[in-house]
Image: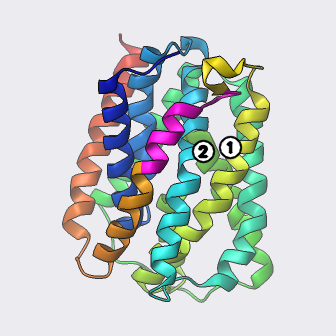
Amino acid sequence: MEISILGWAVYLLVGALAGIMAGLLGVGGGMIMVPALLWLLPMAGVADGHLMQTALGTSLAAIIITSIASLRAHQRRNAIRWPVVRWLAPGVVAGALLAGAIAAWLSSDLLILIFALFALIIALRIVFARPVHVVSAPANFCWPAWGLGIGTASGLVGIGGGSLTVPLLLHYGFPITQAIGSSSAVGLPIAIGGTIAYIAAGPDQHLNTGLAGFVYLPAVLCLSLASWFTAPFGAKLAHRWPAARLKKIFALFLLIVSARLFWRVLVA
């Protein structure tokens, strides 16, 4: 499998955009990378039967670096609530491992439909957002259960979990910058657990294919390299820009992606 010069450039661009969105909103890295990978991976020779699994595994592997870059930037601004991150971490790792095992048994088309539905739900939630109803934070032992749900859902759609973690933390009264910063930290164990699961669940591959299980390593390299430099920029903007307008643009992007994926599986 070889990537053309244009392909390398596109991977770098996708990684740059994913890094900015991850740092800025605490969401969006995987939601950008997975649809792009569905278009790019067939050009690298990935079989249709394993296309979505490979897109998910590759996205999660790239999110490892994106999360590290983003959490480092947020940590410099003291925007991460580490006690909550530590309570969430065991659950999200277990959930991500479970998701990889489940994904190996599902068809690529079914996984695409799951991603399309998830993108639609997130977009509608952004568009019709209501004022956050803040409640008291639960006892510490409840956080791993939330983490299990976040990790499983995130692993099945190839994301770092920000679109789930940020609303949860806002619901429990976290300031927006701390919700975003803590979400970036939670994304790291999700990405690590998910990557391990998708490598282990995928078929054995020769190194010259560029594949390790369901992870396409050349794409991971490009996406990670670009996001490493842009995630801190996004995190910096998160502390300066009101994100409402950008979230609306992101919601429109998700609606378009969702519609195209539903069309691809159900109509085309």
What x and y, as percent, mark residue 216? 58, 29
What x and y, as percent, mark residue 173? 50, 87
Q: Write the start and end of the magenta stretch as one range.
A: 212-225
Main SS class of the magenta portion in the image: helix
Residue 232 placement, left or right of 52: left
Three-letter amino acid code of the residue under disc 1: Thr
Q: Is residue 9 magenta?
A: no
Q: Is residue 214 magenta?
A: yes
> Around disc 2, counting alpha carbons within 10 Å, would you say few (fewer than 14), some (14 to 19), or many (20 or more)?
many
Q: Nearer the viewer, residue 11 or 201?
A: 11
Label drawn at residue 221: none
Above-or-below relation of 11 to 31: above
Between disc 1 and disc 2, whose residue precedes? 2
Q: Can you identify the residue that label 1 sits on?
A: 195
Above-or-below relation of 3 to 248: above
Specify the quadrant of the image occupied by residue 104. top right
Q: Can you identify the residue that label 2 sits on?
A: 61
Above-or-below relation of 32 to 180: above
What x and y, as percent, mark residue 162? 50, 61
Answer whether labels 1 and 2 touch (C-beta < 8 Å): yes
Q: CA distance from mark 1 to mark 2?
A: 5 Å
Three-letter amino acid code of the residue under disc 2: Ala
Residue at (58% x, 21% y) in the render = 108
Specify the quadrant of the image occupied by residue 236. bottom left
Residue at (60% x, 24% y) in the render = 210
Residue 160 placement, left or right of 207: left
